[in-house]
Amino acid sequence: MSKIITEKSKKAFAEAQNFIPGGVNSPVRAFGGVGGTPIFIKSGAGCYMTDVDGNKYVDYVCSWGPLILGHADPRVVKRINEAVANGTSYGAPTEQEIRLAQLIKEAMPSIEKVRMVNSGTEATMSAIRVARGYTKRDAVIKFDGCYHGHVDSLLIQAGSGATTLGTPTSPGIPQDFVKHTISLPYNDMDAVNEVCSKRGKEIACIIVEAVAGNMGVVPPKKGYLGGLREITKKYGIVLIFDEVMTGFRVNYGGVQSLYNIQPDLTTLGKIIGGGLPVGAYGGKKEIMDSISPVGPIYQAGTLSGNPVAMTAGIATLEILKDNKIYKDLEQKSQRLAAGMEKVCKDAKLPTYHTRVGSMLCTFFTDQPVTDYDTAKKSDTKRYAKFFHGMLERGFYFAPSQFEAAFVSTVHGVKEIDATIDAFKDVVIGL
Ligand SMILES: *Cc1c(COP(=O)(O)O)cnc(C)c1O
């Protein structure tokens, strides 16, 4: 094994810290979860990224999910170039916005109307506002370990009991902003039933990562999503599936098509932007028509529906529409997950493996992971060793235990088998 040289990345990181808080524009990139200094990237092509020192990595972060076609897919790049040549923004409606909305609606029939925004955070923030405005209720239920972007009212830590008040997880968020947010354990239907039986008529919405992907990958238990659908119907609560990560990822129609459960609202992002900044929220016509300019609930955006970003999204979804793609992705992801699991088993290393489609996770724990509490039992020091071991061998996994690994359409069997082989080598040191 040849240790990689990362002198230029180290230099860039030192310099970046003079200008940018922590040297990064999103905290997880700083490698705080695994130690060491971040790799600065120069370029990406297919399933590979090349850093500023010239090291090449098989990329399992895929920009945290958006790059399901890998880096710089030539078909997407061509369409982006054509779009840019026609001007980058008009602040007026375009036909591209109709086309992307149409593709989304076809993929997810629960979405009758959809509004474009610029990030996943904006999508969840807006969806919650609409749910509150529409129901004329204030309370929101979310789940521990589910991440919905850095929305003030959702950055909350659960209280000690289901009915105690949560506290903000970040300074700068007044306690008053989160007093209407109830955080419950994921995959625990009893907790939801208990709160709803007392306060069901006060609750505007339940927002859930239908497959959780921000505490590592944690699939919903059998009957959980159906249970959420039932109880929200009973109390007139808006059910929001946050499919920013899972939409067009777990399959074309997202978790809602995989488990055949229709939420009232869906939030999207990541893949629908084809690598450019896009978010969206949509759902029942009746709810969506309460948004301005049709209804009274305000939401707007200078660059929303940006023609270049719309074009990247359209190009990506038009390629993904071919369902063979997801079959192939499933097989490759299965091969990687099974291969990694076998490596751990052979080495007698206690791990727990989860996967839904092309999202997968190796938790370094001997217990099943079903929620945030069990996810947190993972040995993060061991994960850090895994991460650095793989990085040194040219495989770029997320710099945190509590993230997914993503397989793209351009990860070949060759790269996947090489990943498993490298892991065999790394596991010895764990
Ligand atoms: C990434 C993510 C978000 C936030 O999206 P940003 O574009 O980073 O603001 C929200 N919800 C989920 C489930 C996500 O994975």
Image (cartoon, grey):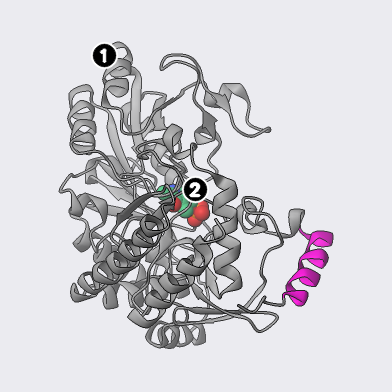
Q: Given the current orientation, which residue lies at the most extreme left position?
A: 260
Q: Position of residue 99 (x, y in %)?
A: 29, 70
Say what secondary structure mark 1 lies in.
helix
Please check the rendered image and state whether residue 13 is part of the magenta-colored stretch, yes or no: yes
Other-residue count near label 2 (Cα within 10 Å), few / some / many at <14 / 14–19 / ≥20: many
- Which of marks 2 and 1 precedes in the sequence? 1
Q: Nearer the viewer, residue 324 or 92?
A: 324
Give the residues in magenta. 6-20
Q: In x, y percent, where is residue 144? A: 44, 33
Q: Within 8 Å: ligand 1 and the Cβ of disc 2? A: no
Residue drawn 52% across the image and 61% down it: 428
In-image side of 6 versus 305 (left or right)? right
User: Mark 2 = which residue?
Assistant: 402
Above or below, 120 relative to 141: below
Q: CA distance from mark 1 to mark 2?
A: 32 Å
Numbered tag placed on residue 197 in the rendering: 1
State which quadrant residue 356 falls in: bottom left
Name the foreground residue: 102 vs 248. 248
Amino acid type, callout 2: Phe
Image depth: mark 1 or mark 2 in front: 2
Rendering coords of residue 113 (x, y %)? 27, 53
- The residue lying at 67 percent from left, 57 percent from top is 30
